[in-house]
Image (spheres, rainbow, N blue to C red):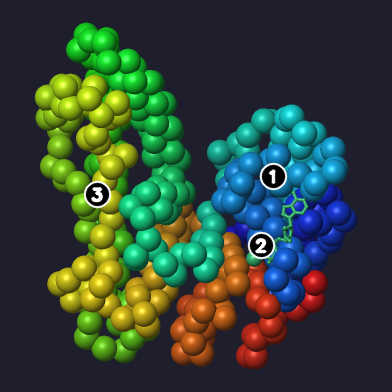
Amino acid sequence: MNKVLGVKLKNFRCHEDFELECPQSTTMIVGENGSGKTSIIEAIYLALRGKSFKGVDREILRRGADFYRAEILLSDAQKVVIRFDGVKKSFEIDHKKSLRLPKKYRYPVVLFEPDDLHLVGSSPSRRRDYFDEFFKQIDANYGVVLSRYAKALRQRNDLLKDEAVSRDTLFSWNVLLAHYGSEILQRRISNLKKINALLTDNYRGIAKNEDECSLEYLGEKDLSENRYMEILERNFERDTLLGYTSFGVHRDDFEFIFNGEKADGSASRGEIRSIILALKFIEAEVLEMELNKKPVVLLDDIFSELDDMRQQHLIENFKDYQMIMTSTNALRGINGELLNL
Ligand SMILES: Nc1ncnc2c1ncn2[C@@H]1O[C@H](COP(=O)(O)OP(=O)(O)O)[C@@H](O)[C@H]1O
Ligand SMILES: [Mg+2]
């Protein structure tokens, strides 16, 4: 199990010069709104995953500064140093520099932020992004296929802006979209199966009742590459009229089902919170199962949104993981390092 042992930041968002040691398995960072809690979580995430969940380097760079530097010390005896000079970013591990965080150094993370509690009722694109990020962690190839699909989609959409575009011109893009798209679909469906196998049990562990929940894939589920291709070809007129690609995995969605109905609209606020909590537990479980590594759990400012019962479940469930959490006020009953910002 890899652990975060320390964080040093220079010109990273509001942190001009910041240092944190977190040798224990639980660290609680307490500070007012705007004191820089999420920025610390962002830096840790960046070192473990290779990119931010919030923004790009220009936004991270402290206003007025001309470089940022983040140094994250990990228990695997490696130190990840990230530097950005206003134009280029580099990662340095074991004195080796690279423009991206090498795959072998990426480490699984379960990030839980307040916005996740609104996942059930949020937009399809938010849910797609959410599950895509999760599936990328399970399987690095998923990310590769996803970005190839996105690139082909951008190019096809650019061509569609021209009303005079011909079927022949689109053909090679259709081939690529059908190829990558059907692969994305397959992986989404198989990962969803893994989640569904665990969701109801996890939910019941929290809610202590007999309710059922699951996730359903919204989109064509049974789609071979050929059939995918046929639909794209068939949509030629429609797509040229619209000026974009109207069919494909980039339009699909994930729906939460609660006791046989759409959770959005039927489940109560408390029930939805329990569903999301269950989903977080499953993320950790699936990541550990698939990668044989215990993810680092980052809990950013979610406690104020959860009642005592759910707070306790959260802490109890993640007690065997390293937890780094933030809050605007110190929480009772947490054993660990406390840092006041
Ligand atoms: N590039 C930047 N330079 C300077 N300040 C920034 C930058 N990006 C964000 N901030 C500021 O940093 C502060 C801390 O943000 P954040 O880490 O989200 O705090 P918290 O999570 O504690 O509420 C905010 O006031 C924000 O406006
Ligand atoms: Mg915050």
Disc number lying in front (1 or 2): 1
Where is 175 relative to 194, above or below?
A: above
The image quarter in which residue 64 lies = top right
- Alpha carbons under labels 1 and 3: distance apart: 35 Å
Kindly identify the amino acid type of the residue bearing the numbered disc 2. Answer: Thr
Disc number lying in front (1 or 3): 1
User: Horizontal placement of 237 versus 36: left or right?
Assistant: left
Q: Which residue is mark 2?
A: 38
Q: Residue at x 37, y 60 (%)?
A: 122
User: Horizontal placement of 45 versus 19: left or right?
Assistant: left
- Alpha carbons under labels 1 and 2: distance apart: 14 Å
Q: Along the line of sight, which residue is nearer the eye, 201 or 241? A: 241
Q: Is residue 5 visible?
A: no
- The circle drawn on residue 59 is 1
Kindly identify the amino acid type of the residue bearing the numbered disc 1. Answer: Glu
At which x and y percent is residue 210?
22, 85
- The circle drawn on residue 189 is 3
